[in-house]
Amino acid sequence: MNTLSLTQRKTGLYVLFNIVSLAFIYFIPTISHMVGLPLYYIEPMRIMLVLALVHTNKSNAYVIALTLPLFSFLVSAHPYFPKMILITAELLLNVWFFYFIFNRTGKAFVAIISSIIISKAAYYAIKFALISFAVLPNSPLVSTPIYIQVITTLVFSAYLALLFKRKEQ
């Protein structure tokens, strides 16, 4: 009986996490407008993905990777469909590579920073091809400055590594 209630409690917390994630993505344009800063530069979907990796489980991280871009597309038509597919693929790769590397090394920092870099490299390679084939016309290859991407990658990686270390203790 206790195991079932613990499982139900965890499931409830994961559902709550997912609702908060969707709300965050929904309101990020409004918040950006209110504060006058392009908050999309800090990669809100990746923030929620990293939080899912730390605070939920592997399955839920995949759910977040699949649903956030789709939700954003459905409620705001942004990103447009081909880019939504591209972002979804990037986030799914991020989760897959994270667990692949983490299971082999046991090092959370190495796993998350590597998985972000690999998934971003795949994203840019595919985006370049899509731009070349006019699937993403008039789209710049890099829209978020590289230095911001480096900073956010380091911050996300440090956060995840720190919390994974605390979980182990």
Image: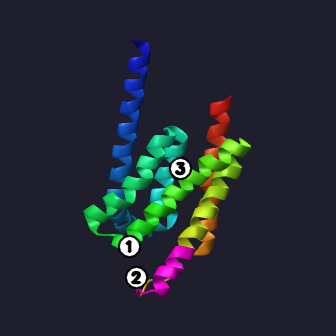
> What's under tag 2, amino acid-wise?
Val
Q: Is residue 158 left or right of residue 128?
A: right
Residue at the image point whose x is 58% and y is 63% from the top:
119
How far apart are the two marked residues, 2 and 1, measured between alpha carbons? 7 Å
Tell me if mark 1 has few (under 14), some (14-19) or many (20+) residues whose alpha carbon lies within 10 angstroms of its own: few
Tell me which segment is drawn in magenta: 125-137
The residue indicated by pointer 1 is 82
Q: Are marks 2 and 1 in contact (CB under 8 Å)?
A: yes
Vertical position of residue 138 compared to residue 21: above or below: below
Which of the 4 quarters of the picture holds residue 134? bottom left
What SS does tag 1 mark? Answer: helix
The residue indicated by pointer 3 is 50
- Residue 106: tell me if it is visible: yes
Foreground tag (2 vs 3): 2
> What's under tag 3, amino acid-wise?
Val
Question: Which is nearer the eye, 79 or 105?
Answer: 105
> What's under tag 1, amino acid-wise?
Pro
Residue 64 at x, y percent in the picture:
42, 50
